[in-house]
Image (cartoon, helix red, strand yellow):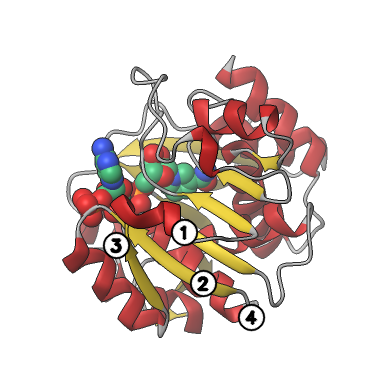
Amino acid sequence: MITDSYTELYGVFGDPVSHSLSPVMHSRAFAHIGYNAAYLAFRIKDIAAAVSAIKTLGMKGVSVTIPHKVSIMPHLDALDGMARRIGAVNTVINRDGVLTGYNSDWIGAVKALSEKTDIRGKSAVIIGAGGAARAIGFGMVAENAKVTIVNRSADKGGRLAKDLGVEFCPLSDIKNLGCQILINTTPIGMTPNTESTPVPKAYLKKEMLVMDIVYNPLKTRLLKDAEQSGCTVADGLSMFVYQGAFQFELWTGKNAPIEVMRDAATEFFR
Ligand code: NAP
């Protein structure tokens, strides 16, 4: 890539951030449409100073990842309605010095699921009650799915269920709960614990759509079990690519080259 004095600057703010797939995915997408822009990873300790730097340096947009998705919010000038409801921001756009925060995690999950089925009216179990579950929960409720939150700890799970206006079920009781869509948002099954799974294989029925948002490994034990049980599956990379596609379209106003982004993320991952 050749930069010049017209190159626009984008990046991801996180800590740690060296594992992020976003730089390779967005850089490839920018190059694909011939956009003179660079996208870099920034390891950030002081989020207030980093937000100020967006304006000082004239950065056009940033992705935000752990641990700054919540703490960045008070430093922004405006918030999108869903980001405000979810209580987390993973995307910032700089419009003439006005910084607006969005959340594209819910959009990524809803798009990845919508590729496989019509979500409306479907019963959906979301396992987990952390940041990702919160974003996906608000997204699924907005899409009129019938959501149940399932979590290990009852206090956190119950709180999220209450915020969403849906039912809560302890993870230990999941066997009594049928569903059409099952979404794992916990890190269970992530490298190095690749033999772990949040639900026993017997729970999985062939009519189910099963999504695991863990993408390291790409095919988790849950997804392997689901495939063997005849379920439709969606992997965590699809959600990741679609949340990135929303960012790309917000920043550039152009259609995201989804396949280019997916290939770039997959190659980097391998
Ligand atoms: P988080 O806020 O820390 O929440 C983690 C949730 O998982 C909590 O509800 C926790 O339950 C539960 N959990 C953790 N370990 C568990 C275990 N051993 N058994 C049962 N439950 C367990 O994390 P997050 O930000 O939501 O992220 C969760 C995962 O999603 C991470 O692996 C992250 O990389 C991935 N992610 C993927 C994408 C994507 O685009 N594909 C986007 C965002 C996040 P308790 O409440 O009981 O502690």
Q: Quadrant of residue 235?
A: top right
- Dot 3 amino acid type: Ser
Q: Which mark is residue 52?
A: 3
According to the picture, the residue beneath numbered tag 1 turns out to be 126
- Dot 4 amino acid type: Asn
Q: Which mark is residue 147?
A: 2
Of marks 3 and 2, the one in the foreground = 2
Nearer-N-terminus badge (3/1)? 3
Nearer-N-terminus badge (3/2)? 3
Q: Is residue 227 left or right of residue 79?
A: right
> What is the spatial separation of the Cα atoms under label 1 and label 2, in whole angstroms?
7 Å
Kindly identify the residue that appears in the image at 78 percent across and 59 percent down: 117
- Dot 2 amino acid type: Val
> What is the spatial separation of the Cα atoms under label 3 and label 2, in whole angstroms?
38 Å
In depth, the one of 204 and 144 nearer the eye is: 204
> What is the spatial separation of the Cα atoms under label 3 and label 4, in whole angstroms?
38 Å
